[in-house]
Image (cartoon, helix red, strand yellow):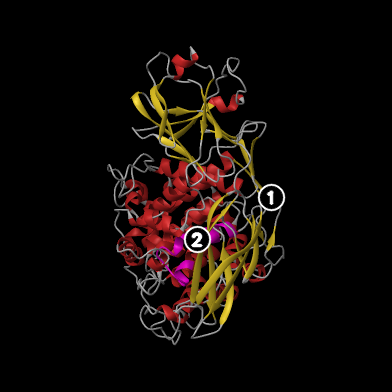
Amino acid sequence: MIKCRKPFSSLGMILLACLSWNLASANDVITLTQYRDKMQGSWIAQMGGAQWGQPFEFKYPRGMISDPLAPLNNYNHLHLHPTSVGLNGAYGQDQLYIQIPFLQAMTALGPQATWSEFGSYFRDTTFPLWSANANARSNLLNGIQAPMSGHYFYNSYSYALSTMIGSSFAGDINPGNVNGAAELSWRAAHVGLYGNGVYGFAHMAAMHAAAYFASSIPEIINAGSAVIPPESQYGQMIRDVLTWSQRQTNHAEDPVPDASANPTGWMAVWSLLEKKYDFQSSASPNIHKALSNDAILHGGYVLIGLIYGDGDFAKSVRITIRAGSDTDCSGSMMAGILGAYLGLSKLPTITTQGINLALSYEGYGSASHPTVTTRDIFTMTEDLTRKTLLMHGGTVSRNAAGDETWTIANSGPAVSLILEQYPYPAPAARDPNALPLVTAAEVSRSGTTVHFSAAATDTHSTIRDYQWFFGDLTYGSGNDVFHTFPAAGTYQVLAYATNQIGNTGFRILNVTVGPLTNPIRVNAGGIATGNFASDRDFVGGNATVSTVRVDTSRVVNPAPQGVYASRRTGQQGQGFHYLFSNLSSHPTYLVRLHFAELLATGIGQRRFNVVINGVPVLQSFDILSEAGGPYIAVIKEFTVRPDGNGQIKIEYTYGDKGNPDANGIEVLPQ
């Protein structure tokens, strides 16, 4: 978590000082109950903010909502309308549902999901899209892969807030880790955006991440600002808004004009923002001409709401909405940050009451795209957060009250992203020679530490800087770097170079570190228990936990009790599987599958199949029959040879009765 350690009495002075005081604190600690309150508050607040701003969307392009009663009246009536006007209308809002393919990709493939994997999940969606997002999906469908799907060569709206409006997930699964949120933003945002659009995504995600542990609004703003290069147009906007707000100290929601009838307070800052960053009327070079879905302007609207809302949820969102243009999107982004800061329990009830958590988001609910509800969003986000914190040295334990306690490792000082901007004058259309040409290679390695080196040339400018995105929620600067990956596995490493005007080029390296020599032990559906790690490497299924005690006296080398008390099970006719990689160090492995029947009470009530690397190993398997009764441990062992990719895939599929079930898995080198 990034802290500001300089005391100032003025909010503006605090913010400006914080930009140069990015000190990292000790590890952050949060209970699962506290995390759920904040994560669910983030999502529910976004639903409320989207619906609050929806009636004013694009009705005030390039103009302020001068009537303070307009958004206030809509706010007071949110809960009275059950469909498009009310809170449940958010199930049809793109700022919510565009986050789903990214969450699904990481749920299936892990937080290290690659550009192409994010792009594939985004490509296959069916929900309505507009602007840069619509262009990106069209590009992907036509074979233009990410990140070129969001590049200005192929996407005329690459500067927009389009994909930026769905940035909260990157912060929600990286609580307190602004660098992790920024690295994930770089991978995800380039599916639909470039330059300022990507910065807007990272800016919002970093503030989301910071909000989980921040003790003040300035800390949140500081964290978001710290990952944006100050020399970029977006970075300059941040500094301008902070400087202007330092001079405009009236924090009234409807500030009275001064003696010369000039606006004051947030309205004065808004006027300055519009004047300077209206590229249609200024000499500032940019790809666009003052369209009302600009990432810079809407990022500024959110900042204004944060500064002048003083931490008050309703006031902050109203000010942001009154800034005009894409009001449902800016309102949702503003609300989500404060939702993570305050938590669901502290949100105004008017923004939460009447929401049906079991409804499905638009574009989901068919055979090809199964239902996705808000409860599903909560589950995916929570599971991914466990993975990200464990990936980087965090721990999961239980406190005296029995609640999970998460310790999130210190991620270090915030790192500014590399400069990326639309070049001016514009290069010839889709001329690959207009981009820096990057070469990159692995120089050497020791264990999971790899030495990388990159070089770049540019026929139009000189190379300014290099930055590496390691695919594991970390990134670093320089053409020559050493990086230690958190675990054995395959990572997509991105080597970036930028020239003096911010035009970027990149090279992709697929790096496998390992191979794995230590045993794998996974608690299916549960947290770390004894020498069994928390659930990982799975696709599909549902996790449940029981408090029953299982008889382990009838098996040799049983798992800890906690393994048999938790389970991963199939749901709605869909089985699940585990995929373990980097298993090339040994010719064979002993696979031990742990089971205990916790639900069925009679033989024949649950019969399912298990397939390992395409070979059926258990058919019509009945745990109860095998064990001789419920709550009795069963272990089935198999000697398995990894496939040609060094992987072992264990599939739990439906038989003729009940859901497939798993309690624990061991993969032991032989």
Q: Is the magenta region chiefly helix, strand or loop?
A: helix
Residue 82: image location, x then y, percent: 31, 45
Question: Mark 2 = which residue?
Answer: 185
Amino acid type of the residue that numbered disc 1 sits on in the rendered structure: Asn
Secondary structure of the residue carrying numbered label 2: helix
Compare residues 652 and 451 and report the one nearer the observer: 451
Secondary structure of the residue carrying numbered label 1: loop
Judge from the rendering whether residue 6 lies leftward or rightward of residue 562; answer left or right. right
Question: Is 210 drawn above or below residue 256 in the view shown?
Answer: above
Residue 481: image location, x then y, percent: 64, 66
Q: Residue at x 43, y 80 (%)?
A: 433
Question: Which of the numbered marks, if any, corresponds to residue 27?
Answer: 1
Residue 298: image location, x then y, percent: 44, 68
> What distance separates the C-alpha of mark 2 from that of mark 1?
23 Å
Q: Residue at x 55, y 77 (%)?
A: 456
Residue 253 visible (yes or no)? no
